[in-house]
Image: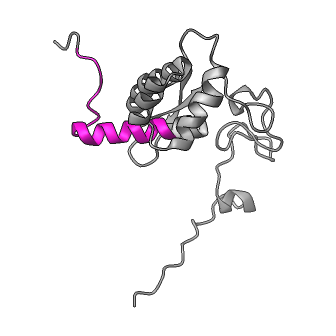
Amino acid sequence: MRHRWSGRKLGRTSAHRQALLRNLVTALLEHETIETTDAKAKEVRRVAERMITLGKRGDLHARRMALRVVRTKEVTTKLFDELAPRFRERPGGYTRVLKVRRRVGDAAPMSMVELVDREQKGGSSAGARSEPKAGRTKGKGSAAPADGTSKPRRGGRAAAAGSAGAAKPTRARRAKV
């Protein structure tokens, strides 16, 4: 049983794990959003929330404790001067973890960690978009074919040209030197 064991090892030594979390927290506080794996996101959230709480305290000791984790003085200054006043009235829960996708190489679940009250660049958040972009359809090959049959058209050059029985075009290969 693993009762009362807090934290994840993330397949790293303790020094490597600490360096990883410090880098991720610094990036999160600097950019206010990062994308990482689910397990790392949940660990980063713990450390980042502690840093924002230290920023809300605002005294010299809190600043020195934050400098032990945050990598740069510029991000520490942003934490104490911009982020802490923004979260002054919030009693916790400064970050949000959103599951985004599966990573292409190994299908690892990816998440986006962001600050809750972050300022949007461009007016609206990507997740709050109500209409899809013009000219796009949902999914691959979901458009109905032109000849009126019920099967969806397959993607590729042969389908775009309209030839149903055409062979798959071959890729040109580089000559070995």
Quarter occupied by residue 122: top right
Determine whether 174 is above or below 105 in the image. Answer: below
Q: Left or right: where does residue 69 sit relative to residue 27? A: left
Which residue sits furthest right?
A: 134
Nearest to the observer: residue 69 or residue 120: 69
Q: Left or right: where does residue 31 sit relative to residue 144? A: left
Q: Position of residue 135 (x, y in %)?
A: 82, 44
Quarter occupied by residue 21: top left
- Give the residue displayed 49% in from the left and 39% down from the top: 26
Which residue sits furthest bottom?
A: 177
- Give the residue displayed 56% in from the left and 8% down from the top: 91
Residues shaded magenta: 5-26
- Give the residue displayed 39% in from the left and 27% down from the top: 43
Which residue sits furthest front?
A: 60
Residue 116 seen from this side: no
Q: Position of residue 167 (x, y in %)?
A: 58, 66
Nearest to the observer: residue 38 or residue 31: 31
Q: Residue 7: say if magenta.
A: yes
Nearest to the observer: residue 155 or residue 123: 123
Q: Position of residue 166 (x, y in %)?
A: 63, 65
Residue 99 seen from this side: yes
The quadrant of the image that shows the C terminus is bottom left
Quarter occupied by residue 170: bottom right
Q: Left or right: where does residue 137 sit relative to residue 167? A: right
- Give the residue displayed 38% in from the left and 44% down from the top: 106
